[in-house]
Image (spheres, rainbow, N blue to C red):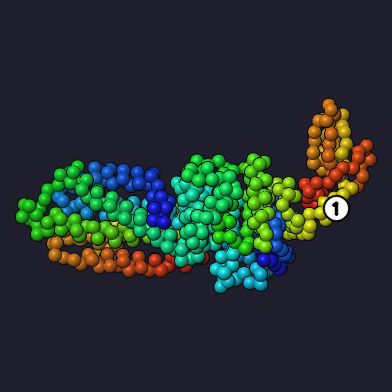
Protein backbone atom coordinates (compact mmCIF):
# COMPACT_ATOMS: atom_id res chain seq x y z
CA UNK A 1 0.00 0.00 0.00
CA UNK A 2 1.42 3.33 -1.00
CA UNK A 3 -0.19 6.75 -0.88
CA UNK A 4 0.93 9.46 -3.28
CA UNK A 5 0.06 13.11 -2.75
CA UNK A 6 0.75 15.52 -5.58
CA UNK A 7 0.51 19.30 -5.40
CA UNK A 8 -2.18 19.12 -2.73
CA UNK A 9 -3.83 22.34 -1.59
CA UNK A 10 -6.66 22.76 0.87
CA UNK A 11 -8.17 26.22 1.25
CA UNK A 12 -11.16 26.74 3.51
CA UNK A 13 -14.12 29.02 2.79
CA UNK A 14 -12.59 31.70 5.03
CA UNK A 15 -9.60 31.75 2.61
CA UNK A 16 -7.25 30.10 5.11
CA UNK A 17 -4.89 27.72 3.33
CA UNK A 18 -4.31 24.75 5.61
CA UNK A 19 -2.23 22.75 3.11
CA UNK A 20 -0.22 24.57 0.49
CA UNK A 21 0.96 22.77 -2.67
CA UNK A 22 2.46 19.74 -0.97
CA UNK A 23 3.94 16.52 -2.31
CA UNK A 24 4.36 13.35 -0.28
CA UNK A 25 4.68 9.62 -0.70
CA UNK A 26 3.68 7.42 2.22
CA UNK A 27 5.20 3.94 1.96
CA UNK A 28 4.38 0.71 3.83
CA UNK A 29 5.01 0.62 7.56
CA UNK A 30 4.52 3.25 10.23
CA UNK A 31 4.93 6.73 8.82
CA UNK A 32 5.20 9.59 11.31
CA UNK A 33 3.60 12.97 10.96
CA UNK A 34 4.99 15.69 13.15
CA UNK A 35 4.24 19.36 13.40
CA UNK A 36 3.16 22.19 15.64
CA UNK A 37 -0.51 22.91 16.36
CA UNK A 38 -2.20 24.33 13.29
CA UNK A 39 0.47 23.02 10.94
CA UNK A 40 -2.14 21.21 8.83
CA UNK A 41 -1.70 17.62 10.09
CA UNK A 42 -5.35 17.03 10.95
CA UNK A 43 -6.50 18.65 7.69
CA UNK A 44 -4.18 16.32 5.79
CA UNK A 45 -5.59 13.31 7.63
CA UNK A 46 -9.16 14.44 7.00
CA UNK A 47 -8.37 14.69 3.29
CA UNK A 48 -6.79 11.24 3.31
CA UNK A 49 -9.88 9.78 5.00
CA UNK A 50 -12.10 11.45 2.34
CA UNK A 51 -13.83 13.53 5.02
CA UNK A 52 -12.56 16.68 3.33
CA UNK A 53 -12.18 17.25 -0.41
CA UNK A 54 -8.98 18.97 -1.52
CA UNK A 55 -9.13 22.34 -3.28
CA UNK A 56 -6.59 21.19 -5.84
CA UNK A 57 -4.02 18.47 -6.39
CA UNK A 58 -4.33 14.70 -6.50
CA UNK A 59 -4.07 11.80 -4.09
CA UNK A 60 -3.88 8.15 -5.03
CA UNK A 61 -3.92 4.97 -2.99
CA UNK A 62 -2.18 2.11 -4.75
CA UNK A 63 -2.96 3.81 -8.05
CA UNK A 64 -6.62 4.44 -7.18
CA UNK A 65 -7.30 8.13 -7.57
CA UNK A 66 -9.19 9.94 -4.80
CA UNK A 67 -12.40 11.02 -6.52
CA UNK A 68 -16.13 10.76 -5.78
CA UNK A 69 -16.66 7.51 -7.70
CA UNK A 70 -13.65 5.81 -6.08
CA UNK A 71 -14.51 6.90 -2.53
CA UNK A 72 -16.42 3.72 -1.55
CA UNK A 73 -13.48 1.58 -2.74
CA UNK A 74 -10.98 3.77 -0.87
CA UNK A 75 -13.08 4.10 2.29
CA UNK A 76 -13.27 0.31 2.67
CA UNK A 77 -9.50 0.22 3.02
CA UNK A 78 -9.19 2.96 5.62
CA UNK A 79 -9.27 2.82 9.41
CA UNK A 80 -9.37 6.15 11.24
CA UNK A 81 -8.94 7.35 14.77
CA UNK A 82 -9.73 11.08 14.90
CA UNK A 83 -8.08 13.39 17.41
CA UNK A 84 -11.30 14.00 19.33
CA UNK A 85 -14.00 11.41 19.45
CA UNK A 86 -16.74 10.62 21.90
CA UNK A 87 -17.87 7.04 21.38
CA UNK A 88 -21.40 6.04 22.39
CA UNK A 89 -21.51 6.82 26.14
CA UNK A 90 -24.57 4.63 26.80
CA UNK A 91 -23.05 1.47 25.28
CA UNK A 92 -20.59 -0.94 26.82
CA UNK A 93 -17.16 -1.31 25.24
CA UNK A 94 -18.20 -4.65 23.70
CA UNK A 95 -21.52 -3.29 22.38
CA UNK A 96 -19.86 -0.20 20.99
CA UNK A 97 -17.23 -2.17 19.10
CA UNK A 98 -19.72 -4.77 17.83
CA UNK A 99 -21.96 -1.97 16.61
CA UNK A 100 -19.15 -0.14 14.83
CA UNK A 101 -17.83 -3.39 13.35
CA UNK A 102 -21.31 -4.15 12.06
CA UNK A 103 -21.57 -0.71 10.45
CA UNK A 104 -18.18 -1.27 8.84
CA UNK A 105 -19.54 -4.49 7.34
CA UNK A 106 -17.39 -6.94 9.31
CA UNK A 107 -19.18 -10.33 9.66
CA UNK A 108 -20.50 -10.85 13.19
CA UNK A 109 -18.36 -13.83 14.24
CA UNK A 110 -15.21 -12.43 12.68
CA UNK A 111 -15.93 -9.11 14.37
CA UNK A 112 -16.22 -10.75 17.81
CA UNK A 113 -12.97 -12.59 17.23
CA UNK A 114 -11.17 -9.40 16.30
CA UNK A 115 -12.67 -7.53 19.25
CA UNK A 116 -11.41 -10.24 21.63
CA UNK A 117 -7.95 -10.05 20.08
CA UNK A 118 -7.62 -6.28 20.10
CA UNK A 119 -9.14 -5.84 23.56
CA UNK A 120 -6.50 -8.26 24.82
CA UNK A 121 -3.77 -6.37 22.98
CA UNK A 122 -4.91 -3.05 24.44
CA UNK A 123 -5.49 -4.44 27.97
CA UNK A 124 -9.19 -3.68 27.81
CA UNK A 125 -10.61 -7.22 28.18
CA UNK A 126 -11.58 -6.72 31.81
CA UNK A 127 -13.33 -3.45 30.95
CA UNK A 128 -15.40 -4.78 28.05
CA UNK A 129 -18.64 -4.72 30.05
CA UNK A 130 -18.14 -1.19 31.29
CA UNK A 131 -20.15 1.62 29.75
CA UNK A 132 -18.11 3.99 27.59
CA UNK A 133 -18.97 6.88 29.90
CA UNK A 134 -17.32 5.04 32.80
CA UNK A 135 -13.95 4.76 31.07
CA UNK A 136 -10.98 7.04 31.63
CA UNK A 137 -9.69 9.22 28.80
CA UNK A 138 -6.88 6.79 28.04
CA UNK A 139 -9.24 3.80 27.90
CA UNK A 140 -11.59 5.66 25.55
CA UNK A 141 -8.61 6.38 23.33
CA UNK A 142 -7.75 2.68 23.23
CA UNK A 143 -11.32 1.72 22.36
CA UNK A 144 -11.15 4.33 19.60
CA UNK A 145 -8.03 2.69 18.27
CA UNK A 146 -9.65 -0.77 18.37
CA UNK A 147 -12.63 0.47 16.32
CA UNK A 148 -10.18 1.79 13.72
CA UNK A 149 -8.54 -1.64 13.46
CA UNK A 150 -11.75 -3.72 13.29
CA UNK A 151 -12.09 -3.80 9.50
CA UNK A 152 -8.37 -4.70 9.19
CA UNK A 153 -7.68 -1.62 7.06
CA UNK A 154 -4.86 -1.45 4.56
CA UNK A 155 -4.34 2.19 5.46
CA UNK A 156 -4.65 3.16 9.11
CA UNK A 157 -4.72 6.82 10.06
CA UNK A 158 -4.28 7.62 13.73
CA UNK A 159 -4.34 11.12 15.14
CA UNK A 160 -2.68 11.34 18.56
CA UNK A 161 -3.45 7.73 19.59
CA UNK A 162 -1.30 7.87 22.71
CA UNK A 163 -2.81 10.99 24.25
CA UNK A 164 -3.77 10.39 27.88
CA UNK A 165 -2.09 6.99 28.12
CA UNK A 166 0.35 6.02 30.85
CA UNK A 167 3.90 5.01 29.77
CA UNK A 168 3.22 1.27 29.79
CA UNK A 169 0.07 1.65 27.74
CA UNK A 170 1.85 3.90 25.31
CA UNK A 171 4.41 1.22 24.73
CA UNK A 172 1.66 -1.38 24.18
CA UNK A 173 -0.12 0.84 21.66
CA UNK A 174 3.11 1.63 19.87
CA UNK A 175 3.93 -2.05 19.59
CA UNK A 176 0.42 -2.82 18.42
CA UNK A 177 0.75 -0.23 15.67
CA UNK A 178 4.13 -1.61 14.60
CA UNK A 179 2.74 -5.18 14.50
CA UNK A 180 -0.27 -3.97 12.56
CA UNK A 181 1.86 -2.11 10.03
CA UNK A 182 3.33 -5.30 8.56
CA UNK A 183 2.36 -5.13 4.86
CA UNK A 184 0.14 -2.17 5.65
CA UNK A 185 0.49 1.59 5.94
CA UNK A 186 0.00 3.41 9.23
CA UNK A 187 0.00 7.20 9.31
CA UNK A 188 0.85 8.13 12.88
CA UNK A 189 0.38 11.75 13.87
CA UNK A 190 1.53 12.82 17.30
CA UNK A 191 3.13 15.55 19.37
CA UNK A 192 4.96 12.96 21.45
CA UNK A 193 8.24 12.82 19.59
CA UNK A 194 9.48 9.77 21.50
CA UNK A 195 6.48 7.77 20.24
CA UNK A 196 7.64 8.42 16.70
CA UNK A 197 11.23 7.62 17.58
CA UNK A 198 10.08 4.24 18.87
CA UNK A 199 7.84 3.32 15.95
CA UNK A 200 8.76 5.00 12.68
CA UNK A 201 11.61 4.94 10.30
CA UNK A 202 10.16 7.48 7.92
CA UNK A 203 8.45 10.71 8.84
CA UNK A 204 7.27 14.06 7.57
CA UNK A 205 7.40 17.33 9.44
CA UNK A 206 4.74 19.94 8.69
CA UNK A 207 4.81 23.64 9.30
CA UNK A 208 2.27 26.19 8.12
CA UNK A 209 0.72 23.81 5.60
CA UNK A 210 3.98 22.67 4.03
CA UNK A 211 6.33 19.76 4.56
CA UNK A 212 9.58 21.11 5.82
CA UNK A 213 11.08 17.66 5.99
CA UNK A 214 10.28 14.23 4.58
CA UNK A 215 12.65 11.34 4.92
CA UNK A 216 14.23 9.03 7.43
CA UNK A 217 14.46 9.61 11.13
CA UNK A 218 18.24 9.09 11.08
CA UNK A 219 18.81 11.79 8.47
CA UNK A 220 16.70 14.23 10.43
CA UNK A 221 18.75 13.57 13.53
CA UNK A 222 21.99 13.87 11.56
CA UNK A 223 20.97 17.31 10.33
CA UNK A 224 20.98 18.55 13.90
CA UNK A 225 24.38 17.02 14.78
CA UNK A 226 26.73 19.68 16.06
CA UNK A 227 23.94 22.08 16.88
CA UNK A 228 22.88 20.80 20.28
CA UNK A 229 24.88 21.79 23.35
CA UNK A 230 25.03 21.46 27.08
CA UNK A 231 26.18 24.23 29.37
CA UNK A 232 26.06 25.00 33.06
CA UNK A 233 24.93 28.32 34.44
CA UNK A 234 25.22 29.78 37.88
CA UNK A 235 21.65 30.88 38.48
CA UNK A 236 18.20 31.49 37.08
CA UNK A 237 18.96 35.00 35.80
CA UNK A 238 21.83 33.66 33.72
CA UNK A 239 19.54 30.89 32.45
CA UNK A 240 17.01 33.52 31.36
CA UNK A 241 19.71 35.34 29.42
CA UNK A 242 20.53 32.07 27.66
CA UNK A 243 16.86 31.53 26.86
CA UNK A 244 16.72 34.93 25.17
CA UNK A 245 19.75 34.14 23.06
CA UNK A 246 19.29 30.46 22.25
CA UNK A 247 16.54 27.87 21.95
CA UNK A 248 16.73 26.08 25.30
CA UNK A 249 15.19 22.61 24.99
CA UNK A 250 15.88 21.26 28.49
CA UNK A 251 16.70 22.69 31.86
CA UNK A 252 17.52 20.74 35.00
CA UNK A 253 19.41 20.93 38.27
CA UNK A 254 22.39 18.55 38.33
CA UNK A 255 24.40 18.39 41.55
CA UNK A 256 23.17 21.80 42.60
CA UNK A 257 24.02 23.41 39.29
CA UNK A 258 21.63 24.48 36.58
CA UNK A 259 22.29 22.55 33.37
CA UNK A 260 20.83 23.76 30.09
CA UNK A 261 20.47 21.93 26.82
CA UNK A 262 20.15 24.34 23.97
CA UNK A 263 20.13 24.43 20.23
CA UNK A 264 22.23 26.84 18.27
CA UNK A 265 23.09 26.95 14.56
CA UNK A 266 26.71 27.84 15.43
CA UNK A 267 29.06 27.01 18.30
CA UNK A 268 28.30 29.45 21.11
CA UNK A 269 31.03 31.60 22.58
CA UNK A 270 30.28 30.43 26.10
CA UNK A 271 31.74 27.33 27.71
CA UNK A 272 29.69 24.38 26.50
CA UNK A 273 29.99 20.84 25.19
CA UNK A 274 28.17 19.10 22.33
CA UNK A 275 25.65 16.46 23.25
CA UNK A 276 23.83 13.53 21.71
CA UNK A 277 20.96 14.62 19.49
CA UNK A 278 17.48 13.24 20.11
CA UNK A 279 14.58 13.35 17.67
CA UNK A 280 13.04 16.12 19.75
CA UNK A 281 16.19 18.23 19.41
CA UNK A 282 16.28 17.53 15.69
CA UNK A 283 12.63 18.56 15.36
CA UNK A 284 13.22 21.81 17.24
CA UNK A 285 16.33 22.53 15.20
CA UNK A 286 14.42 21.92 11.99
CA UNK A 287 11.27 23.86 12.79
CA UNK A 288 12.70 26.77 14.78
CA UNK A 289 16.18 27.32 13.47
CA UNK A 290 16.41 26.00 9.93
CA UNK A 291 12.88 27.02 8.90
CA UNK B 1 -28.59 -4.11 16.22
CA UNK B 2 -32.12 -3.02 17.17
CA UNK B 3 -31.23 -3.02 20.87
CA UNK B 4 -28.04 -1.08 20.23
CA UNK B 5 -29.77 1.50 18.04
CA UNK B 6 -32.41 1.78 20.77
CA UNK B 7 -29.79 2.48 23.41
CA UNK B 8 -28.19 5.10 21.17
CA UNK B 9 -31.32 6.91 20.05
CA UNK B 10 -33.45 6.49 23.17
CA UNK B 11 -31.36 7.38 26.19
CA UNK B 12 -33.15 7.60 29.55
CA UNK B 13 -33.25 11.42 29.59
CA UNK B 14 -35.11 11.53 26.28
CA UNK B 15 -37.69 9.01 27.44
CA UNK B 16 -38.07 10.91 30.71
CA UNK B 17 -38.66 14.33 29.16
CA UNK B 18 -41.03 12.92 26.55
CA UNK B 19 -43.07 11.14 29.22
CA UNK B 20 -43.16 14.26 31.41
CA UNK B 21 -44.27 16.30 28.39
CA UNK B 22 -47.21 13.97 27.76
CA UNK B 23 -48.22 13.91 31.45
CA UNK B 24 -48.07 17.71 31.71
CA UNK B 25 -49.97 18.11 28.44
CA UNK B 26 -52.77 15.82 29.59
CA UNK B 27 -52.95 17.74 32.88
CA UNK B 28 -52.91 21.33 31.67
CA UNK B 29 -54.55 21.28 28.23
CA UNK B 30 -58.19 21.60 29.15
CA UNK B 31 -60.84 19.63 27.25
CA UNK B 32 -64.55 19.13 27.81
CA UNK B 33 -65.40 16.39 25.35
CA UNK B 34 -63.54 13.23 24.44
CA UNK B 35 -63.39 14.16 20.72
CA UNK B 36 -61.13 17.09 21.70
CA UNK B 37 -58.33 14.83 22.89
CA UNK B 38 -56.88 14.31 19.40
CA UNK B 39 -57.11 18.05 18.71
CA UNK B 40 -55.37 18.81 21.99
CA UNK B 41 -52.57 16.38 21.28
CA UNK B 42 -51.66 16.61 17.58
CA UNK B 43 -49.74 19.91 17.44
CA UNK B 44 -47.93 19.60 20.81
CA UNK B 45 -46.90 16.02 19.98
CA UNK B 46 -45.59 17.26 16.61
CA UNK B 47 -43.40 19.75 18.47
CA UNK B 48 -42.20 16.95 20.75
CA UNK B 49 -41.40 14.79 17.70
CA UNK B 50 -39.24 17.58 16.31
CA UNK B 51 -37.19 17.89 19.48
CA UNK B 52 -37.07 14.11 19.92
CA UNK B 53 -35.83 13.23 16.44
CA UNK B 54 -33.55 16.18 15.67
CA UNK B 55 -30.48 14.46 17.11
CA UNK B 56 -31.07 11.15 15.29
CA UNK B 57 -27.96 11.73 13.20
CA UNK B 58 -26.56 15.04 14.49
CA UNK B 59 -25.39 13.25 17.65
CA UNK B 60 -22.80 11.64 15.37
CA UNK B 61 -21.68 15.09 14.23
CA UNK B 62 -21.40 16.67 17.68
CA UNK B 63 -19.47 13.69 19.03
CA UNK B 64 -17.18 13.69 15.93
CA UNK B 65 -18.17 10.11 15.20
CA UNK B 66 -19.45 11.24 11.81
CA UNK B 67 -15.85 11.33 10.57
CA UNK B 68 -15.70 7.58 11.15
CA UNK B 69 -19.25 7.05 9.86
CA UNK B 70 -18.15 8.53 6.54
CA UNK B 71 -15.99 5.46 6.01
CA UNK B 72 -18.93 3.07 6.39
CA UNK B 73 -20.99 1.93 3.40
CA UNK B 74 -23.83 4.36 2.71
CA UNK B 75 -26.45 1.59 2.82
CA UNK B 76 -25.52 0.66 6.38
CA UNK B 77 -25.44 4.27 7.50
CA UNK B 78 -28.90 4.89 6.08
CA UNK B 79 -30.22 1.67 7.57
CA UNK B 80 -28.92 2.79 10.95
CA UNK B 81 -30.60 6.22 10.66
CA UNK B 82 -33.81 4.60 9.42
CA UNK B 83 -33.90 2.15 12.32
CA UNK B 84 -33.31 4.94 14.84
CA UNK B 85 -36.17 6.92 13.31
CA UNK B 86 -38.53 3.93 13.44
CA UNK B 87 -37.68 3.21 17.08
CA UNK B 88 -38.18 6.83 18.08
CA UNK B 89 -41.46 7.08 16.20
CA UNK B 90 -42.74 3.89 17.86
CA UNK B 91 -41.96 5.35 21.28
CA UNK B 92 -43.65 8.65 20.38
CA UNK B 93 -46.72 6.86 19.08
CA UNK B 94 -46.89 4.69 22.21
CA UNK B 95 -46.61 7.84 24.32
CA UNK B 96 -49.40 9.44 22.29
CA UNK B 97 -51.62 6.42 22.99
CA UNK B 98 -50.76 6.57 26.68
CA UNK B 99 -51.36 10.34 26.68
CA UNK B 100 -54.76 9.79 25.06
CA UNK B 101 -55.66 7.56 27.98
CA UNK B 102 -54.31 10.08 30.48
CA UNK B 103 -56.73 12.73 29.23
CA UNK B 104 -59.54 10.36 30.16
CA UNK B 105 -57.96 9.66 33.53
CA UNK B 106 -57.15 13.26 34.51
CA UNK B 107 -59.96 15.26 32.92
CA UNK B 108 -62.96 12.89 32.73
CA UNK B 109 -64.33 14.32 29.45
CA UNK B 110 -67.96 13.92 28.40
CA UNK B 111 -68.75 11.18 25.90
CA UNK B 112 -71.01 12.39 23.10
CA UNK B 113 -71.54 8.87 21.75
CA UNK B 114 -73.10 7.68 25.00
CA UNK B 115 -75.31 10.80 25.07
CA UNK B 116 -76.44 9.88 21.55
CA UNK B 117 -74.98 13.08 20.06
CA UNK B 118 -72.32 11.38 17.95
CA UNK B 119 -72.18 8.34 15.68
CA UNK B 120 -68.49 7.78 16.42
CA UNK B 121 -67.68 5.59 19.41
CA UNK B 122 -64.74 6.29 21.75
CA UNK B 123 -62.89 3.32 20.31
CA UNK B 124 -63.52 4.44 16.74
CA UNK B 125 -62.17 7.89 17.62
CA UNK B 126 -59.06 6.29 19.06
CA UNK B 127 -58.64 4.11 15.97
CA UNK B 128 -58.71 7.22 13.77
CA UNK B 129 -56.47 9.16 16.15
CA UNK B 130 -53.67 6.56 16.06
CA UNK B 131 -52.88 6.51 12.31
CA UNK B 132 -53.42 10.28 12.04
CA UNK B 133 -50.95 10.79 14.89
CA UNK B 134 -48.51 8.27 13.37
CA UNK B 135 -48.41 10.29 10.14
CA UNK B 136 -48.04 13.58 12.03
CA UNK B 137 -45.22 12.24 14.22
CA UNK B 138 -43.44 10.69 11.24
CA UNK B 139 -43.64 13.92 9.24
CA UNK B 140 -42.38 16.28 11.96
CA UNK B 141 -39.74 13.82 13.14
CA UNK B 142 -38.28 13.23 9.72
CA UNK B 143 -38.47 16.96 8.92
CA UNK B 144 -36.43 18.01 11.94
CA UNK B 145 -33.88 15.24 11.35
CA UNK B 146 -33.49 16.25 7.71
CA UNK B 147 -33.10 19.95 8.51
CA UNK B 148 -30.67 19.14 11.33
CA UNK B 149 -28.58 17.02 8.93
CA UNK B 150 -28.71 19.76 6.31
CA UNK B 151 -27.45 22.43 8.70
CA UNK B 152 -25.38 19.96 10.76
CA UNK B 153 -27.03 21.35 13.88
CA UNK B 154 -30.03 19.95 15.73
CA UNK B 155 -31.11 23.34 17.09
CA UNK B 156 -31.29 24.84 13.60
CA UNK B 157 -33.30 21.78 12.56
CA UNK B 158 -35.75 22.28 15.41
CA UNK B 159 -35.88 26.06 14.83
CA UNK B 160 -36.69 25.78 11.12
CA UNK B 161 -39.31 23.13 11.91
CA UNK B 162 -40.91 25.38 14.52
CA UNK B 163 -41.38 28.14 11.92
CA UNK B 164 -43.36 25.75 9.71
CA UNK B 165 -45.21 24.47 12.79
CA UNK B 166 -46.26 28.01 13.75
CA UNK B 167 -47.42 28.85 10.22
CA UNK B 168 -49.46 25.68 9.71
CA UNK B 169 -50.82 25.49 13.24
CA UNK B 170 -52.52 28.88 13.05
CA UNK B 171 -55.78 30.44 11.93
CA UNK B 172 -53.96 31.72 8.85
CA UNK B 173 -52.69 28.21 8.10
CA UNK B 174 -56.17 26.80 8.56
CA UNK B 175 -57.71 29.36 6.20
CA UNK B 176 -54.98 29.16 3.57
CA UNK B 177 -54.50 25.40 3.43
CA UNK B 178 -57.87 24.03 4.48
CA UNK B 179 -57.97 20.25 4.16
CA UNK B 180 -54.35 20.30 2.90
CA UNK B 181 -53.05 21.66 6.18
CA UNK B 182 -50.35 19.51 7.81
CA UNK B 183 -52.53 19.62 10.94
CA UNK B 184 -55.73 18.79 9.06
CA UNK B 185 -56.72 16.28 11.74
CA UNK B 186 -56.78 19.11 14.30
CA UNK B 187 -58.73 21.43 12.00
CA UNK B 188 -61.27 18.80 10.86
CA UNK B 189 -64.98 19.27 11.41
CA UNK B 190 -65.47 17.22 14.56
CA UNK B 191 -69.23 17.55 14.36
CA UNK B 192 -69.27 15.60 11.11
CA UNK B 193 -67.46 12.28 11.68
CA UNK B 194 -68.38 11.16 8.15
CA UNK B 195 -66.31 13.96 6.59
CA UNK B 196 -62.85 12.66 5.68
CA UNK B 197 -61.59 15.66 3.69
CA UNK B 198 -58.88 16.11 6.33
CA UNK B 199 -57.21 12.96 4.96
CA UNK B 200 -55.79 15.15 2.13
CA UNK B 201 -53.56 16.84 4.67
CA UNK B 202 -52.30 13.50 5.93
CA UNK B 203 -51.71 12.25 2.38
CA UNK B 204 -49.71 15.42 1.76
CA UNK B 205 -47.69 14.65 4.91
CA UNK B 206 -47.01 11.14 3.61
CA UNK B 207 -45.92 12.43 0.21
CA UNK B 208 -43.59 14.93 1.86
CA UNK B 209 -42.23 12.14 4.07
CA UNK B 210 -41.44 10.10 0.98
CA UNK B 211 -39.71 13.09 -0.63
CA UNK B 212 -37.67 13.74 2.52
CA UNK B 213 -36.72 10.05 2.77
CA UNK B 214 -35.38 10.26 -0.79
CA UNK B 215 -33.46 13.45 0.03
CA UNK B 216 -31.82 12.06 3.18
CA UNK B 217 -29.09 9.98 1.45
CA UNK B 218 -28.07 12.94 -0.69
CA UNK B 219 -27.83 15.26 2.31
CA UNK B 220 -25.94 12.70 4.40
CA UNK B 221 -23.53 12.11 1.53
CA UNK B 222 -22.95 15.79 0.87
CA UNK B 223 -22.94 17.13 4.43
CA UNK B 224 -21.46 14.07 6.14
Which residue does the image show at 29% across and 54% down from the upper left?
Answer: B93
Give the image quarter of residue A273: top right
Q: Could you tell me if residue B61 is visible in this image?
A: no
Which residue does the image show at 20% across and 60% down from the upper left?
Answer: B128
* Residue A199 % position (x, y): 72, 52
* Residue A39 % position (x, y): 70, 54
Question: Outermost residue, left direction?
Answer: B116
Which residue does the image show at 32% across and 52% down from the upper left?
Answer: B91
* Residue B60 % position (x, y): 49, 54
Q: Residue under label 1, please give it.
A: A222
Out of A111 and A200, give the one closest to the viewer.
A111
User: Please, which chain is the residue tagged with disc 1 on?
Assistant: A
Q: Helix, strand or loop at disc 1?
A: helix
Out of A233 and B10, give the one closest to the viewer.
B10
Q: Could you tell me if residue B42 is visible in this image?
A: yes
On screen, residue A121 versus residue A32, left or right, reads left
Which residue does the image show at 31% across and 65% down from the upper left?
Answer: B205
On screen, residue A276 versus residue A75, left or right, reads right
Up/down of B91 relative to B74, above or below: above
* Residue B73 % position (x, y): 50, 65
On screen, residue A54 versus residue A234, left or right, reads left
Out of B184 and B53, give the one closest to the viewer.
B53
Amino acid sequence: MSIKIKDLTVTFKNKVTAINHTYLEIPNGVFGLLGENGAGKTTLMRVLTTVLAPTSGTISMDGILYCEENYPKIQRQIGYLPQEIDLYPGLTVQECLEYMGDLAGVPKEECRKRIRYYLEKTSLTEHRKKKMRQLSGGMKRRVGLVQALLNEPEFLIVDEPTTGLDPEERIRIRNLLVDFSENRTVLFSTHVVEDLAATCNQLAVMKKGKFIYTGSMTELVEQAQGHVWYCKVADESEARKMEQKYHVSAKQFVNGELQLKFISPFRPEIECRPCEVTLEDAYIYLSNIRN
Amino acid sequence: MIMTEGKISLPAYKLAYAFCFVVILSLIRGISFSFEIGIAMEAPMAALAMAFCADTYTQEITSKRSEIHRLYPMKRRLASIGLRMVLQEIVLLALSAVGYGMFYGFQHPQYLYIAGQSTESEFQMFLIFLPAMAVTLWFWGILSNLLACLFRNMWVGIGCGIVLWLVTNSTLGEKLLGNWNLFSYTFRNVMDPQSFGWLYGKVLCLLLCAAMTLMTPKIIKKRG
